[in-house]
Amino acid sequence: MQRLTSEILEFISQNSEIAICNNTDDFPNSPFDYIFLKEKELVFHCITLNVVVQDSTFFQNITNEFSQKNLKLVHIWEDIWQNKQKIVKSRLLSLLGKSETIPARLTQVRRIDRPTLDNFLTANHLQGKTTAKLKYGLFLPKKYFRILDFNKNTLSENSEEILVAAASFSNAKKIMREGHEFRSYELIRFANLKGFTVVGGFNKLLKNFIQEQNPDDIMTYADSDWSDGSNYEKLGFERIEQTPPLEFVLDSQTLTRKLNSLVGSPTPSIQANGSEKIYNSGNWKFLMKLKND
């Protein structure tokens, strides 16, 4: 068993009593370990970096095979686990149903500035910060701090409020679709505060955005390494397509990755500087149509 798998197993065991099934004979062949939580219909694919997979569609194909088995698959990469472990653990707690919960009805929505968004996403989103035109935050006022257990987190009771979720959107773009022009926006990022799930928080932010901006439609992507995007469908988004896997360049010394902007270039999988090409499982594209024809 790889060290990565052992560390993830230990974390799951410390935070959940869900049985872990080792019978994976009917799972797709992989050089990496699986962790199967049958009760949750959930599988973790623990991807170590000592094996280089040449096939760019390998992880996407496995994702789709598990989907056909009605099992949710999460790819946990060793570099992500090492560099963003607190965020990964927060995502795992959410999948295990062990996050602290905050009812969205107790929160307040308002616009936030770029530094506030950047700091929040850096601390709470696996993909970190990015440029965005429109930025919104959900704040829990001090009068509701009583629902929080400050013995279990590092939050400050001296604050007047706590930012517990944030969402960012692009500016409007004119898109021609089916012979009509649409004012289309992109939902770029959404994140909860680490260790917490704001129940109804994303929906509250989304409704506020729609009321304020009156978009014709909203487009977004779900990272297939972590999600099939079914929660978007529950809120009225339509599943449009599965995008090709993204290509990253991984520095094998520092275990940091960067999106390869030169996809398709004839560079070998192992570069002269010791970096390697890796491929994720792509994204799911979703669209919420709001314009009445």
Image (cartoon, helix red, strand yellow):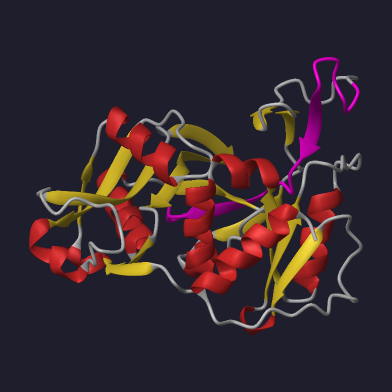
* Relative image position of residue 262 (x, y in whole percent): 76, 20
- What's the residue at 25%, 46% (across, down)? 212
Q: What count of labels does the image hold? A: 0
Q: Nearer the viewer, residue 91 or 79?
A: 79
- What's the residue at 35%, 68% (across, down)? 100
Q: Is residue 122 above or below residue 88?
A: above
* Relative image position of residue 192 (x, y in whole percent): 38, 54
- What's the residue at 26%, 65% (across, down)? 104
Quarter occupied by the N terminus: bottom right
- What's the residue at 69%, 82% (across, down)? 38
* Relative image position of residue 134 (x, y in whole percent): 33, 35
Q: Nearer the viewer, residue 22 or 186?
A: 22
Left or right, 173 with reference to 261: left
Left or right, 50 with reference to 165: right
Q: Is residue 12 above or below residue 1?
A: below
* Relative image position of residue 253 (x, y in whole percent): 72, 26
The span picked out in magenta is: 268-293
Q: Nearer the viewer, residue 133 or 261?
A: 261
Q: Is residue 123 above or below residue 253?
A: below
Left or right, 129 with reference to 205: right
Residue 228 visible in the displayed image: no
Left or right, 264 with reference to 45: right
In the image as oriented, which residue stretches furthest toward the top? 272
Q: Nearer the viewer, residue 250 or 13?
A: 13
The question of residue 283 being in magenta is answered with yes
The question of residue 291 being in magenta is answered with yes
